Image (cartoon, coloured by chain):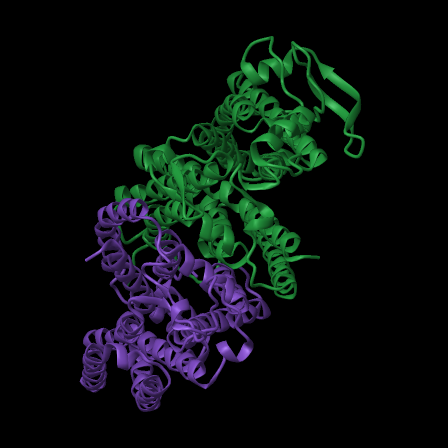
Chain colours: A green, B purple
Amino acid sequence: MDTVMLSRIQFASTTIFHYFFVPVSIGLALLIAIMETMYVRKGNEEYKRMAQFWGKLFLINFAVGVVTGILQEFQFGMNWSDYSRFVGDVFGAPLAIEALLAFFLESTFIGIWIFGWDKVSKRIHLLSIWLVAFGTMLSAFWILAANSFMQHPVGFQINNGRAEMNDIFALITNGQLLVEFPHTVLAAYATGAFLVTGISAYKLLKKQDVAFFRKSFEIAAIVGIISSFGVAVAGHAQAQYLVETQPMKMAASEGLWGESGDPAPWTVFANIDTENQTSSGEVQIPYLLSFLSYSKFSGEVKGMLELQKEYELAYGPGDYIPPVKTTFWSFRIMVAAGSLMIALGVYAIYLMWRKKMDKPNTWFMRFMFWGLLLPPIANTSGWIMTEIGRQPWTVFGLMTTEDSVSPNITSGQVLFSVISFTAIYAILGAVMIGLFIKVIKKGPYAMDNEHGESHDPYNKED
Amino acid sequence: MSLNELWFLLIAVLFVGFFFLEGFDFGVGMETQILAKNDTERRVLINSIGPFWDANEVWLITGAGAMFAAFPHWYATLFSGFYIPFVFALLALIARGVAFEFRGKRDSKTWQKTWDVCIFFGSFLPPFLLAVVFASFIKGLPIDGDMQMYAGFFDIVNAYTVVAGITVVLLCLVHGLMFTTLRTLGDLQERARKLAQKLLIPLAVLLVAFVIMTYNMTDIFDKRGTLLWIVVALGVVAYLLSGYFMTKKKDGYAFGMTGAVMALSVASIFIGLFPRVMISSLDQAFNLTITNAASGHYSLKVMTIVALTLLPFVLGYQIWSYFIFHKRVHEKEHLEY
């Protein structure tokens, strides 16, 4: 395999793996901040225990997120040095700001949060977790500002063959960012929320620490349903923006080769033939693609064949059609997972509203447990659609993936790094799941004494 | 001062800060195998850096990010050119970072030993490899006219860079030991101080060897002689003072002095480089400099405003966190890790 393909595998595996942890961190930080706020305001120790129990999972997850994040930053220079040279001006700046603004904040205050339970006042301690939660959001904003530039480059001019920034405000008010940021952050909140409802459902099914987990479930379900709805709304806005700025990605995500017709139907399933550039056996919902694209029930959407001609005129000869099947199916998987989240969330809220949480239906709780997998599935397929659907570009319209790779690395080197990093991800993933299960099995009331010491750690003693 | 010079300075400050701060927690990481006699001591050591190591590591991430933003060519040439050393450094940093969090989560001895090995190698390899990288910066590397670096094994690993690596590792260890004297009590504290004192002689030999080799094998003393000799003189004074304070058991001052030696060593590399950022061994004309490797003026201006606004806050709350956890870690209290 050549270095381009290997580097893409490297980037995909690192980013996908890293992105299992990032949304959990963002989501759990918010939930823990809410729980600790309730503790400080109501003075009820149960909420403190809640913050600490979910905090344990948060910290295990956070550690893996942090260490894979370093790799995330270094790999641009390692595998994609020509890309880095070309966009460093515009792309490096948000990354540096992310580190200065967000990483320092998160890492310092997470330290205070972990070690400060009996060293700082309740309010400072609470402030710490809110600052961590705020930091994770800032971090998301800046990295998405960088990603949005790749989807829809703005605020730059080409100088001496490099993209130089000429308007930072254009960069942070990039239309792509304004739809991508809420979509991504709300999805992250949903990820944290469904993790908490999922684990709580498991414990409720086992009838362990029922009061504790019912309360956790309820707090998380509220966050979960609000954010799941929000994700859908923001996703709709993103689709409309996509038709305008990256119509090829939109067409590919629909498996749409020719014209859609007016009004355009949305394809639920289709048999895509990339060789003959046709799709067959489509199951379609009338009007829906027009609505997704334009928020009205009419309007045509361009197909890939016509767009290919347009792109050739604009960018010169080349193949501008991304891997259609991957783009098509990842979009559908994302939408399906997102819809299921909303359905589960609505029913959970219904149960809470009708005060039926005392005896929730066993089947529903099982669904809620497995529901914790839905957000990671949706997140991953969403990013696959976004990044694969942009191919052959790294920066849309400006630089191709082929041209981005480091010219001075060998495929042997990249293969070595792919194998060693993938191996360490596999180990970390397995260990993390193992530790999660251990912490969950022990439950929130076994925490105080876990190092086998005979004292209460929350009593001050010196 | 031009913005390019300012950003060179800021990146130098970030790396000096990184080696000063993470330097001691790398050192403490090594102590878990060298100094600690049992699991409790190991845990005391890990907890003594618990609240800090992550934020210390962010100095490295910010340094790399600042390079990316201000000198994209530097970032690109450096990270692609040192591909394999960075793979190892990253593997080590990954293993170390999770090891702190994971090691205490199960009672099994094998489990803890496994993560202890990760902590040790994770604390030893990154400073070694980063020192190798920095030393080869000033020695010169095969960088061609397109700013692409094609380095063979011996361009990166050779007597000079290995001496630099070992020196920095040992310096981290001594610096870490002094940190331990500040954050622990009793026997552990005593032993830390004694070991630091013992290591002063071999470390001095290494430092002198490194200066002599640098004088003979690089051009930096020709380029910045006066300034570098002043730095070397300051380093010698700080070194002697650190030894003096150790005998007087003035641990705080001694820690300051080992930190000063570290800071001056890293600073000397940047002083010697300036205004170059990477030196080509093929042709002077191929050097990467603060001019030809830099971002456009607008980017630098924006980044300057952002950095100068944020840095005071970052420094403020980081110092504050050290103040919160200024008390010594006692083995009888609740140990988080």
Name the image quarter holding residue A328. Answer: top right
- Residue name at image x 29 percent, y 61 percent: B8
- Is residue A58 or residue B260 the one in the foreground? B260
Can residue B3 be seen in the rendering of this structure? Answer: yes
Q: Position of residue A303 (x, y in %)?
A: 67, 23
Q: Position of residue B74 (x, y in %)?
A: 40, 61
Is B218 rendered above or below residue A44? below
Q: Is residue A5 left or right of residue A353?
A: right
Q: Position of residue A336 (x, y in %)?
A: 66, 27
Name the image quarter holding residue B278. Answer: bottom left
Q: How many marks?
A: 0
Can residue A59 be seen in the rendering of this structure? Answer: no
Name the quarter where the C terminus of chain B is drawn: bottom left
- Is residue B66 or residue B41 the one in the foreground? B66
Q: Is residue A365 left or right of residue B3?
A: right
Name the quarter where the N terminus of chain B is drawn: bottom left
Is A432 rendered above or below residue A377? below
Q: Position of residue A120 (x, y in %)?
A: 26, 50
- Is residue B53 or residue A112 the one in the foreground? B53
- Is residue B185 or residue B5 the one in the foreground? B5
